Image (spheres, helix red, strand yellow):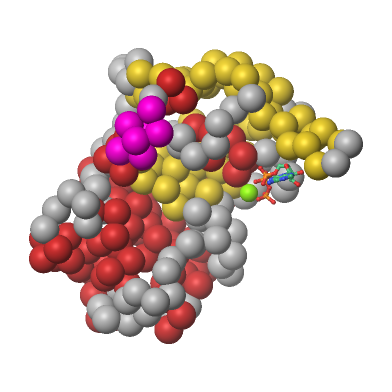
Amino acid sequence: METILTSENLKRSYTIGKTTLDVLKGVSLEVNSGETLSIMGESGSGKSTLLHVLGGLDNPKEGEVHFKNESVYGMSTARRARFRAQNVGYVFQAFHLLPELDIVENVALPAMAMRSKGGAKARAEELLTEVGLGDRIGHRPQELSGGERQRVAIARALMNDPDIIFCDEPTGNLDSKTGEKVLNYLFQLIEARRHTLVLVTHSQDVASRCSRELFLKDGFLI
Ligand SMILES: Nc1ncnc2c1ncn2[C@@H]1O[C@H](COP(=O)(O)OP(=O)(O)OP(=O)(O)O)[C@@H](O)[C@H]1O
Ligand SMILES: [Mg+2]
């Protein structure tokens, strides 16, 4: 199977005043193309930190991330921004939708530099329909429930047909029934398109839906 993403010996710490907190102490990982990988860990274990580093959003202190044999942090800033826009979809823990845009505009945003405005909006509407929000076109995020917002965020992550999708606790803010519904949409979309998924969660139920499960503990993956 083809390897799409690797990390070697990733280290990341945070320094506040005189205290340094070592969060990632040497994380090595291979992600295969088409797999769905979950990374579980307790709150504060560094799951979001790891996902940011893997997704090209946060420089590690040490170590390397390679996407299809290209060093992600060896890229120029412009190249890395383009890599993120074209190859990576990201569903953040706290949605990160823009309140001044309606949901079609939110979903279409990552494609605005790459497609015509009309083409981007048409695809955004298609994706929103696929996540069951076809009747909410024109609404703004603040008019939607938490589960509906998370589905908008999932549609946005798929907008540019990325090679790899990172999901940070996709159901963390939702009740279990809503969470399951959101996960069903997520896995339906991903399996239909054979996307690669890396998902972090503290929930065993969520992790079990993936094809492979890893744990982040004391700064290492096990
Ligand atoms: N910008 C920051 N500055 C200082 N410390 C930080 C920063 N971001 C995260 N941390 C600390 O690093 C540790 C790991 O944080 P991280 O957000 O990666 O954990 P997590 O596993 O995603 O937790 P949760 O499940 O609660 O989302 C925590 O102890 C956190 O307080
Ligand atoms: Mg987190």
55 to 62, vertically: above or below: below
Residue located at (58% from left, 69% from top)? 175
The quarter in which the C terminus is drawn is: top right
Q: Does 112 sit left or right of 222 as displayed?
A: left
The percent position of residue 30, horizontal first and vertical second, equals 46, 20
Q: Quadrant of ligand 1?
A: top right
Q: Nearer the viewer, residue 45 or 71?
A: 71
The quarter in which the N terminus is drawn is: top left
Residue 127 visible to the viewer: no
The percent position of residue 135, horizontal first and vertical second, equals 25, 81
Q: How many marks?
A: 0
Q: Quadrant of residue 138?
A: bottom left
What secondary structure do most residues of the magenta stretch adopt? helix
Q: Nearer the viewer, residue 202 or 83?
A: 83
31 to 184, vertically: above or below: above
Q: Quadrant of residue 134?
A: bottom left
Residue 178 colored in magenta in the image: no
Residue 45 visible to the viewer: yes
Q: Nearer the viewer, residue 105 or 196?
A: 105
Q: Does 155 sit left or right of 13 as displayed?
A: left
23 to 145, vertically: above or below: above
Residue located at (22% from left, 63% from top)? 124
Residue 77 colored in magenta in the image: yes
156 to 143, vertically: above or below: above
Query: What span is in magenta?
Result: 76-82
Residue located at (72% from left, 48% from top)? 43
Q: Quadrant of residue 32?
A: top left
Residue located at (31% from left, 43% from top)? 85
The percent position of residue 208, horizontal first and vertical second, equals 52, 42
The percent position of residue 116, horizontal first and vertical second, equals 11, 58
